Amino acid sequence: MKASSRLVSPAGFALVLLLFLFLPFLSVSCEVPGMGSIGADYTGVGLATGADPAVDIPQDLQDMANELPGSSTSSEPPPDPGVQVLAIITGVVMLAGVALPFVPLFRRRMRERLFGTAAVAFVAGVLVVVTQVVAQSNLTSQLKNDAQGLSQDQVSMPDLNSVADQLIHTEVGFWLSLVGLALIALLSVGFVFKDKLVPKPALAGPPGAAADPGTAPPPDGGPPPDPAAAHLPAADPAGAGAPESAGGAPAAEQPSEQPGAGRSASTPEPPAGDPPQQS
């Protein structure tokens, strides 16, 4: 959870921006049997600035190229991808994702900020794909033109389309940038709808808490007790719950009603077993 929350923060866009700028984005290379490979790597910085990439040529192959009559391949610059504007716009959009949480409009609105993060990541991902497609198309066209000129003057090179397509490779900088932006967009939307996708469990009561006697049915299957009566104070048969007087002393106990209390205290009661004598 912590790693995913960091990915949708400015640190996630900063990481993707570094991957886009400094890792190889495209490359033009070919393998020469017995001599090694010759190629040039295009990074995001090179695409944005229009600088020529460094060309890696094995020394044996360089010497062989110099011995060819009229060869000038060593001094020719690498083909230009022609996506400088697209690369600059892509980097600016990623930089906007880094600065998005610091905008006053989104500083205290988490839902709007997450939607904005997902939108910026989506737009940046589309620009990364468009930059790669346009750059690869431009490089393919230039390599075809160079191969056609070389086949007319010096060496026959059949099937130029397949040869040009095999020389251009999509590198790790493109894939990591695209995957990072896709994760940022998906996680941002997931955090917005997290409560709907993963419902919260019901809060359980504290352990040992007794159930409400007014709502639980009796064990013998009889009618349930009155909920209101369950909350009334229980009667004290010993008179301990009698109300106290204003001074704090308990109120005087009321004499309990006895059978025959309405009779005079001076009139004796006849014995229970002897009938009254008649004169």
Image (tube, rainbow, N blue to C red):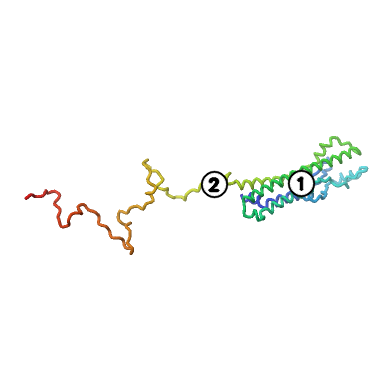
For label 2, the crowd category at 10 Å Cα-Cα, with few meaning under 14, some 14 to 19 and many 20 or more, is few
N-term mark: 2 or 1: 1
Measure how far apart labels 2 and 1 are at the Cα level: 43 Å
- Mark 2 secondary-structure assignment: loop
| Residue 3 appears in the figure | no
Q: Which residue is label 2 attached to?
A: 200
On the image, the x and y values in percent for residue 247 come to 33, 64
Asked whether 159 or 56 is in front, the reply is 159
Q: Is residue 44 left or right of residue 215?
A: right
User: Between residues 62 and 199, which one lies in front from this camera angle?
Assistant: 199
The residue indicated by pointer 1 is: 25
> Which residue corresponds to the image point at 13% horizontal and 48% vertical from the top-left?
273
Q: Position of residue 142 (x, y in %)?
A: 84, 42
Horizontally, is 133 left or right of 109 in the view? right
Residue 10 image point, x, y percent: 67, 53
| Residue that lies at the very extreme toward the bottom in this rendered image | 247
Label 1 SS: strand
Residue 13, labelled with which disc?
none
What amino acid does circle 2 point to? Lys
- Among the 4 quarters of the image, the one containing residue 267: bottom left
Q: Amino acid at mark 1?
A: Phe
Q: Can residue 202 be seen by looking at this rendering?
A: yes
Label pair 2/1, CB-CB below 8 angstroms: no
Residue at (49% x, 48% y) in the render:
204
Q: Residue furthest right?
A: 69
- At label 1, counting other C-alpha atoms closer than 10 Å, the crowd grade (few under 14, some 14-19, many 20 or more) is many
Can you say whether 259 is above or below 154 in the image? below
Residue furthest toward the top?
Answer: 158
Seen at 76% across and 44% down, the residue is: 132
* Residue 74 image point, x, y percent: 88, 46
Nearer to me, 260 or 84 = 260
Q: Is residue 164 left or right of residue 71?
A: left
